[in-house]
Amino acid sequence: MGVWYNIDLGNYKGKYTALTPQIEEYKSCDSDGNILKRVSGKFEKGHFLNEETGETHDKAFKLINGKASEGFKGRVKEVENPVLVEGGESEDILTEKEFLFDCPKLYKHLNDGNKEMVFGGWFGNGFKAYKVYVIPSKLYKGFCIMKAGRGQKSQIIKGIVGDLTEMNDLKEKLASVELTIQKVNKAKVEDLLTI
């Protein structure tokens, strides 16, 4: 559960917490899928070490679905089968990157049909795959906005709200137990001992 901060907005008192997605980290491996440990170099170049065999490697891959995989290079340049979805679905993406997208024909198609386009993409080198939405901009007519993220707000909020609900349930149970205890007579030494 995240940290909550209090804030006063005029006459309104509220609190807020960061929405941080749970990002899966992949283990480093060699080309055969054997797990490697990164060894940082102090005065020499760092390397990767297979702790079982003692072998060192200059290059490592990532173990994804049980297979050694090489990372992405450059940027996504072509998507063969983007998916059209109902407008508003992109509101659930936790946006990490945002771009202005110029394609008047696509803007018209998406805007007229109240649709959005979604596809998987990457920006740069490495292993960060993003869910990317292209939506018609309400502010910049004729342009689209491309939003990319690796987390869904609904998943994160469900975790936070679930945690809050559990905490509130515990508070209610504690209050109920305290109320029950208050109704019970306090034990007295005289009641326990016959003198």
Image (tube, grey):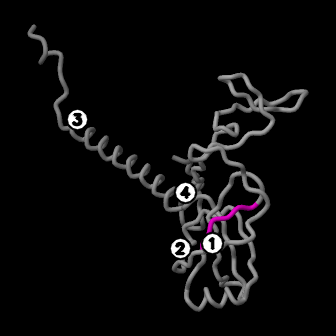
Query: Is residue 52 left or right of 170 when viewed as pictured?
Result: right
**Cα–Cα gap, marks 4 and 3:** 33 Å
Question: Residue 61 in the image: x percent, y percent?
Answer: 71, 43
**Cα–Cα gap, marks 2 and 4:** 26 Å
**Which label sits in the foreground, 3 or 1?**
1
Above or below 193: residue 122: below
Ranked by sequence position, the earlier of labels 1 and 4 is: 4
Residue bearing mark 2:
89
* Residue 147: quadrant of the picture: bottom right
Magenta stretch: helix, strand or loop mostly: strand
* Residue 110: quadrant of the picture: bottom right
Residue under the point 66% across and 66% down: 148
Ranked by sequence position, the earlier of labels 2 and 3 is: 2
Front residue (pair 147, 166): 147
Label at residue 133: 1
Ranked by sequence position, the earlier of labels 1 and 2 is: 2
Q: Residues within 10 Å of mark 2 (few under 14, many from 20)?
A: some
Three-letter amino acid code at disc 4?
A: Lys
The reply to whether discs 4 and 3 touch (Cβ–Cβ < 8 Å) is no
Label at residue 15: 4
The residues colored magenta run: 118-123
Q: Is residue 155 found inside the magenta-colored segment of the image? A: no
**Secondary element type, mark 4:** strand
**Cα–Cα gap, marks 1 and 2:** 9 Å
Three-letter amino acid code at disc 2?
A: Glu
Three-letter amino acid code at disc 1?
A: Tyr
**Which label sits in the foreground, 2 or 4?**
2
Question: Residue 105 in the image: x percent, y percent?
Answer: 69, 90
